[in-house]
Image: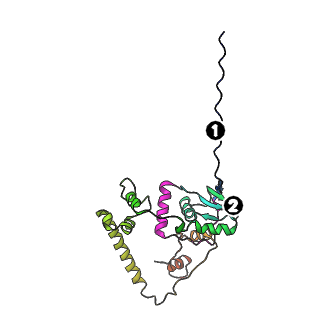
């Protein structure tokens, strides 16, 4: 009688991979209205940079989560991204996954600065960057650059004739616009022609501009505001 085969010993269970002890956030989904701009946030963005950010979000979506402190409800990192998202969603009533952290106010403020500190983010290595910029399969716009950036980094010899022509046209357009602005401002004899209006937060400013039918912008021409409020020229220019 043939002897029964002995069962093969089962392979030992794979050891569980250790989770990093330095991971101090969790991904949670919350309503946009739970997210507040940090009132002390010193980070600003130019109109051009904001335009690039908006184009990138429209093209590929949000690839990096907003960092949100559950103790205060404040954004730690991502003020500009959430601002652009609001303009794309055209509402504050949507949900979003955030990197949720639990920080005291002192640490929150320190990390707000650290996460936007260019000295803590490294620099481009020139040769590698130039190689990427010259890769015809990649888009300068998608990388957040334009012909002017290429010129600034590597000089005119790095640009094609079409890129040089495009940059020249843009510079001429900027020069003409500046000249027109200078003509309109010749009657201003001093610099006390502006007024600063402070809102509690972005949501308050947005509500104000929406109520008046104005473009949501940090700068509003005085005559435009006068026309909307019917305090001055009813046909603002």
Looking at the picture, how far across and down is residue 188, in whole percent? Answer: 46, 88
Q: Residues within 10 Å of mark 1 (few under 14, many from 20)?
A: few
- Whichever of callouts 1 and 2 sits on the residue coming sooner in the sequence is 1
Name the image quarter holding the N terminus. top right
Disc sitting over residue 182 in the figure? none
Looking at the picture, how far across and down is residue 103, in whole percent? Answer: 68, 63
Looking at the picture, how far across and down is residue 170, in whole percent? Answer: 36, 70
According to the image, what is the colour scheme of the structure?
rainbow
In this view, the residue farthest toward the left is: 161
Disc sitting over residue 14 in the figure? 1
Residue 175 occupies quadrant: bottom left
Is 55 included in the stretch rendered in magenta?
Answer: yes
Q: Residue at x 55, y 79 (%)?
A: 230
Is 36 included in the stretch rendered in magenta?
Answer: yes
- Residue 140 visible? The answer is no
Q: Which residues are magenta?
A: 32-61
Residue 44 occupies quadrant: bottom right
Disc sitting over residue 102 in the figure? 2
Q: Nearer the viewer, residue 56 or 111?
A: 111
């Amino acid at each position: 009688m043939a002897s029964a085969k002995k069962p093969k010993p089962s392979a030992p269970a794979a050891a569980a991979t250790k989770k990093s002890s330095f991971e101090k956030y969790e991904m949670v989904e919350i309503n946009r209205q739970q997210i507040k701009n940090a009132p002390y946030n010193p980070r600003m963005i130019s109109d051009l940079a904001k335009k690039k950010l908006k184009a990138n979000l429209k093209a590929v979506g949000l690839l990096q989560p907003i960092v949100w402190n559950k103790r205060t409800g404040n954004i730690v990192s991502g003020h500009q991204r959430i601002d652009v998202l609001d303009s794309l969603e055209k509402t504050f009533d949507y949900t979003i996954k955030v990197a949720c952290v639990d920080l005291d106010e002192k640490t929150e403020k320190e990390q707000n600065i650290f996460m936007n500190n260019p000295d803590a983010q490294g620099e481009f290595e020139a040769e590698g960057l130039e190689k990427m910029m010259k890769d015809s399969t990649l888009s300068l716009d998608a990388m957040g650059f334009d012909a002017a950036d290429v010129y600034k980094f590597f000089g005119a010899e790095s640009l094609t004739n079409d890129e040089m022509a495009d940059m020249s046209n843009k510079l001429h357009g900027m020069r003409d616009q500046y000249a027109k602005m200078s003509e309109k401002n010749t009657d201003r004899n001093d610099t006390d022609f502006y007024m600063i209006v402070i809102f509690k937060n972005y949501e308050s400013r947005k509500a104000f501009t929406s109520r008046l039918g104005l473009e949501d912008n940090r700068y509003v021409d005085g005559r435009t505001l006068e026309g909307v409020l019917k305090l001055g020229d009813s046909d603002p220019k």
